[in-house]
Each structure stands twice: as C-alpha cells, then as structure tokens.
Amino acid sequence: MNRHEILTASILLAIAAISCVLLAAPYVFPPESESSASPVEGDLSTLTTGITAALTTITEHTGSAAETLSTAETLSTAKVQPVLDDLSSTSGYALSFAFVAPDGTITAVAPEIYAESVGVNISTNEPGTTICRMREPFLSDAFVAQEGFTGIEIACPVLSGDEEYMGSVVAMAEPSAIVGEMVAPIEAEHGITVTVMQPDGFILYDRDAAQVGKNLFSDLPFTDYPSLQALGKMIAADAAGSGAYTFYASPEKTGDTMQKHADWDTVSYLGKEWRIILFRDEPGA
C-alpha cells in the first residue's frame, strides 16, 4: 500500500470512529432549550416547583392523618388528639392542625398553643363553610387569621368505609413563611424581589411585610400607580407573562419612583392559582 492509500485509509477510519461516538450518544452538545433558558425562567421554575412541593407535602401529611382516623368507629377527642399531635411534630410547613366535626365544631387541635380554638364552630364563615361540605382535599383562599397573620387552610375529609363524612383534618399554614424561605437566596443572588399573589389581587408574600394581606386592586399604595394597576390586570388574566410598571424604588425609598419589570408564572393546586411574580429594576432606569 503506497503512502497516499495509507493516508486515505487513516482518514476513513477516523471518520468511522467519530460516527460511532455520535451515534452512541444522545447528543454531543446540550439541546438548545437547556442552554437558552434565562435566569428569570430558572428562578420562576425553581419557585413554582418548590411551592407546589410544599403544598403537596402539607396535603399528603394531612390526608394521611385523615386516612388513619377513617378506621375509627367513633372520633372522640381521645382518639383524635394523638393523631394531631403526631402530625404536628412531623410536618414542617404547617403552623397547626385541627379536627373539625361534621357540624363545623373544632374538637381537637395541635400544637397546644392553639387550644383556645377548641369548641369554635367554623361552619358559618369561609373557608369553614366549604370545608364542612367538601368530600375531597381542599385548599382555601388566603385570609387574615385572628392571630393577625395571612393564612391558608388545607383540609382533608375523614370518610368511613361506606363513604360517610366523619369530619375533616385541617392544616393551617402561613404562605409568607413557606415562600420566604425559598425566595431569600434567589432575591439575594439575583437582585430581584418576589411577590406571590392570588388572581384576585390578594398578596400572600412580599419582602415588604406591610404588603402581605393587602389587595393590589383596592389598597394603598398600589391604587396610586396606574401602570401597576394595568399590569396587575394582566397578571390576573394570564397565567404567565411579563410587563413593565412604575412603583416606588424600595420599602426604604417610598418617595422615589422608578421603572420596574415583572415576569410571572403560576402555581395551580387543588383548583386554586397563585401568581409567582419576579420584579427587577429596568436596565438603565
């Protein structure tokens, strides 16, 4: 074999080897969708996934307790209390748990610091009215609790073997505490702020604690900013999107206004929606 033939054979062998590598691997370079994701998209994905996981954990723990109680012939306080105590000691996201009898009366709670709730009938007001008629897991709208914090309730019904409603196990949680733990490192690292809001404008989380429990569409200072109101309507109407608005620079500089940008996505859970909104200052603003 002459020198030219040897060179040609070597080139062909090299091409064949490279082809084998390309065929064996699913890809050599990451797909474009993985390499082109923006930091904002990544942050939104992290938060929506984390919040969904937290709500799911509360529901699973509450549902497990409801399933345990469903095997009891009668649900006396002596039977219910140990189940709630165990639930309270193992579930990290909820503040408290209660058992609500079919007539709406709270008969047991955990931890003990909420014992004054025993005997209260919740059937005449929301979310209690809905809890007492639901036969499946239920997530309430946010509300301002008697203790002063903004809370939600997740309820799981206790059903007997023949599907008779025996009451509900109800978890009370504070969205601001759940979200705040996830948001803090993202806000610090990327220089953004996060708000979590129901589509009706009720604010469940904001770094400015004074805004939590307020409504974007009806409360000051939000109603003083027309562009924010317009953006809020977009956020309420669309599950995901982006837009700009004018608002005060920061909680420490409420007298200064500046242009800001918002990107949002949605957590959908048990029939409810939470808008997860990332805010950042407009470049050059």
Image: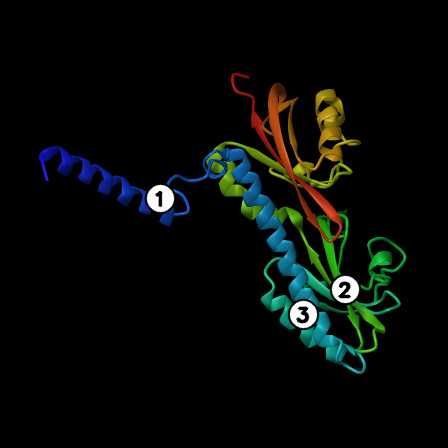
Element carrying mark 3 = helix
- The residue tagged 2 is 116
Q: Earlier in the sequence, mark 2 or mark 1?
A: 1
Please tell me whether residue 120 is drawn above or below residue 183 in the rendered image: below
In this rendering, which labeled residue sits more in front, label 2 or label 1?
1
Could you tell me residue 242's position as x and y percent? 64, 28
Q: Which mark is residue 64?
A: 3
Could you tell me residue 175's position as x and y percent? 66, 49
Mark 3 Cα-neighbour bin, 10 Å: few <14, some 14–19, many ≥20? some
- The residue tagged 1 is 22
Mark 1 touches mark 3? (CB < 8 Å):
no
* In the foreground, 199 or 185: 199
* In the foreground, 277 or 224: 277
Please tell me whether residue 113 is drawn above or below residue 149 in the rendered image: below
The residue lying at 74 percent from left, 56 percent from top is 153
Mark 2 Cα-neighbour bin, 10 Å: few <14, some 14–19, many ≥20? few
Q: Is residue 67 left or right of residue 12?
A: right
Looking at this rendering, what residue extends furthest in the bottom direction? 73
Could you tell me residue 155's position as x and y percent? 75, 61
* In the foreground, 206 or 261: 261
Task: Specify the quadrant that holds the C terminus.
Answer: top right
The kind of residue tagged 2 is: Glu
The kind of residue tagged 1 is: Leu
The residue lying at 72 percent from left, 34 percent from top is 238
